[in-house]
Amino acid sequence: MGTSGERDEENHGKYSPRQGEEAPASRCFRCCDPGSPVYQAIPMPQINITILKGEKGDRGDRGLQGKYGKTGSVGARGHVGPKGQKGSMGAPGDRCKNHYAAFSVGRKKPLHSNDYYQTVIFDTEFVNLYGHFNMFTGKFYCYVPGIYFFSLNVHTWNQKETYLHIMKNGEEVVILYAQVSDRSIMQSQSLMLELRDQDEVWVRLFKGERENAIFSDEFDTYITFSGYLVKHAAEP
């Protein structure tokens, strides 16, 4: 027993024209049954992956330091802050120490040269602060280092040469000199010296290669030697 499909195919193939019609050259016929009915696709649900938060990962390595940015402009000056509290009193300082040194001495006796150098010894003391000038040795001893001023005044002798030096630690520093003359005069010399502790300053008469002398008498003081501290070494 054939199927319905086979009968349909036989019927389609046995087409016969009606009376008076010509058979057509060709004609299309449906050769198959319609397929399975088309069903509408069911939409798939959409999942928002942004709401699916996982566990926190490990901390990454520190990146390289970036370049310094440009210097910004100077900001406006702020308001003056409140006045601070008064501080506590500091510890008392050391007592201010004053430094002094001065002397002025004279000689009332004349002095003549001999075969040796002679230190001029003074017999009159005008000022001798703290005894820094030794009247027995005729020398000033520095106990306060600094800058000193010294002056020497003598009276020359008629027809004799006057030849002396101001000495420092055995060295000739400056000379006081007067040539032979028929008239005696007052002659002077002065200078400033930088002295250290224990330095010595004195006056020396030159030895007797030529007749050399300084004049004075017991009534008047013709020969004087003075010195004083101008600036202490520790002062700025």
Image (tube, rainbow, N blue to C red):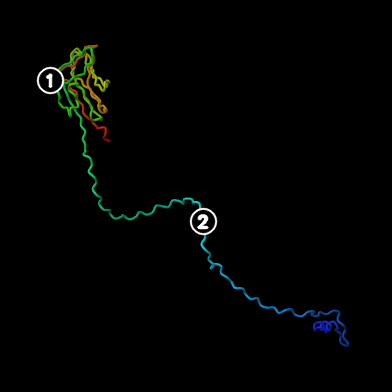
Is tag 2's residue or tag 1's residue first in the polypeptide sequence? 2
Looking at the rendering, which quadrant does residue 174 occupy?
top left
Q: Is residue 235 above or below residue 206?
A: below
Q: Which residue is mark 2?
A: 60
**Label 1 crowding class (10 Å Cα cut-off): few <14, some 14-19, many 20+?**
few
Q: Nearer the viewer, residue 4 or 216?
A: 4
Residue 157 in percent (x, y) is at 18, 15
- Nearer the observer: mark 2 or 1; the answer is 2
Which element carries disc 2, helix, strand or loop? Answer: loop
Q: Amino acid at mark 2?
A: Gly
Looking at the image, residue 167 lies above or below residue 234? above
Picture quadrant of residue 124: top left
In the image: residue 81, left or right of residue 127: right
Tag count: 2
As drawn, the residue found furthest toward the bottom would be: 19
Q: Name which quarter of the figure residue 222 lies in.
A: top left
Residue count near mark 2 (Cα–Cα under 10 Å), binned few <14, some 14–19, many ≥20: few
The amino acid type of the residue labelled 1 equals: Asp
Q: Position of residue 213 (x, y in %)?
A: 19, 15
Residue 19: assigned label: none
Distance from the alpha carbon under mark 2 to that under mark 1:
104 Å
Dot 2 and dot 1 residues touching (CB under 8 Å): no
Question: In the image, residue 211 lies at what x, y percent?
Answer: 21, 12
Q: Measured from the top left, where is residue 109 in percent x and y?
A: 15, 17
Residue in the foreground of this view, choosing between 170 and 1: 1
176 w.r.t. 88: above or below? above
Location of mark 1 (residue) = 220
94 left or right of 8 in image: left
Label 1 residue SS: loop
Q: Quadrant of the C terminus?
A: top left
In which quadrant of the rendered image does the N terminus lie?
bottom right
Q: Above or below — where is 132 with respect to 81?
A: above
